[in-house]
Amino acid sequence: MVILKKLLLMRTKKYKTIGIIIRLVLVLFIATSSCQMQQKKNINSVKPPPLTAEPLKYIYLTFDDGPLNGSENIDSVILGERLKISVFLVGEHAEKSKQLGTYYKLYEQNPFVEVYNHSYTHANNKYELFYSNPENVLADIQKNEKLLNLRYKIVRLPGRNIWRVGGRKRDDGTSGSAAADLLVKNEYKVYGWDIEWQHNASNGIPVQSVDEMVKEIDTRLETGNTFTQEHIVILIHDEMFQKKWEESELKQLIDKMRLHQNYVFEHIRFYPDK
Ligand SMILES: [Zn+2]
């Protein structure tokens, strides 16, 4: 009888010990899982950065034929607006007068402006004759490069919408193709344009309104109707901005394009070449 009691007591003690162990394990398990839940909560409370709804599109504002009367207005607008533009310069213009020489210096010192090559003579506006001799075209470009101390081998041919970028080419159906090929052989890149903001040659007044320009830019980018998709090169001429109200048109164009948060203004040096 005594032995039986002893046995029962031992069993009860054993069960008690097992019970304590089980309880301890349970407490540990609950503590660990609630800690994990807390950690998860913390991770969930850190919001991921908002995704850009639309892909980035690159705008290259390019101004041709400077320095000219009008260059000083472009320079001041760009300094005020703080956005990147590319200017294709004509050396002969820079040498024409002290005033135009000063405008060239304004461009050169403006941190938002990059200066590129538009030839020294601008073909003297006799394009057929100019392009009939590719070697002369190359020499004219090299002369301009030296005179204006141009850092990049980036060219826009005068009077021609011809492209030679990263093994891709486009001609505009006129002469100039052989000259462009010779430039490529000499490590130049040649840039045309996708859209031109046209102007009346006699008084410099823009043909398309600001709204028409913005609409065309938006449409071209949406439909991919550019030399490179998601990238658009816009041609504007310096002489369009000789008056204050035209200067304000340039501001309006910039303001309206800036309403698109996915539009990025870039220098032509960064145009994709692959
Ligand atoms: Zn030109």
Image: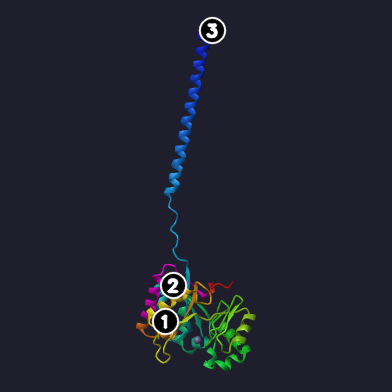
Mark positioned earlier in the residue sequence (3 or 1): 3
In the image, what residue type sits under mark 3?
Answer: Ile
Q: Quadrant of the C terminus?
A: bottom right
Residue hosting label 3? 3
In the image, what residue type sits under mark 1?
Answer: Glu
Give coordinates of residue 168: x percent, y percent: 59, 77
Q: Is residue 128 left or right of residue 63?
A: right
Q: Residues within 10 Å of mark 3 (few under 14, many from 20)?
A: few
- Residue 177 image-quadrant placement: bottom right
Which of 132 and 85 lies nearest the eye of the viewer?
Answer: 132
Count of numbered circles in the view: 3
Is residue 179 positioned above or below 233 on the image?
A: below
Residue occupying the point 43% across, 41% down? 38
Give coordinates of residue 48: x percent, y percent: 45, 54
Q: Tell which residue pokes out farthest to the left in this image.
A: 245
Residue occupying the point 44% across, 48% down? 44
Which of 240 and 23 lies nearest the eye of the viewer?
Answer: 23
Q: Residues within 10 Å of mark 1 (few under 14, many from 20)?
A: many
Q: Are marks 3 and 2 in contact (CB under 8 Å)?
A: no
Q: Is residue 210 left or right of residue 142?
A: left
Q: Secondary structure at mark 2?
A: loop
Part of the protein shown in magenta: 247-268
Give coordinates of residue 113: x percent, y percent: 47, 75
Residue hosting label 1? 72
Q: Could you tell me if residue 138 is visible in this image?
A: no
Q: Residues within 10 Å of mark 2 (few under 14, many from 20)?
A: some
Q: Are marks 1 and 2 in contact (CB under 8 Å)?
A: no
Give coordinates of residue 148: x percent, y percent: 54, 82
Mark positioned earlier in the residue sequence (3 or 2): 3
Q: Label 1, label 2: how many angstroms apart (C-alpha)?
A: 16 Å
Residue hosting label 2? 83
Q: Label 3, label 1: how many angstroms apart (C-alpha)?
A: 114 Å
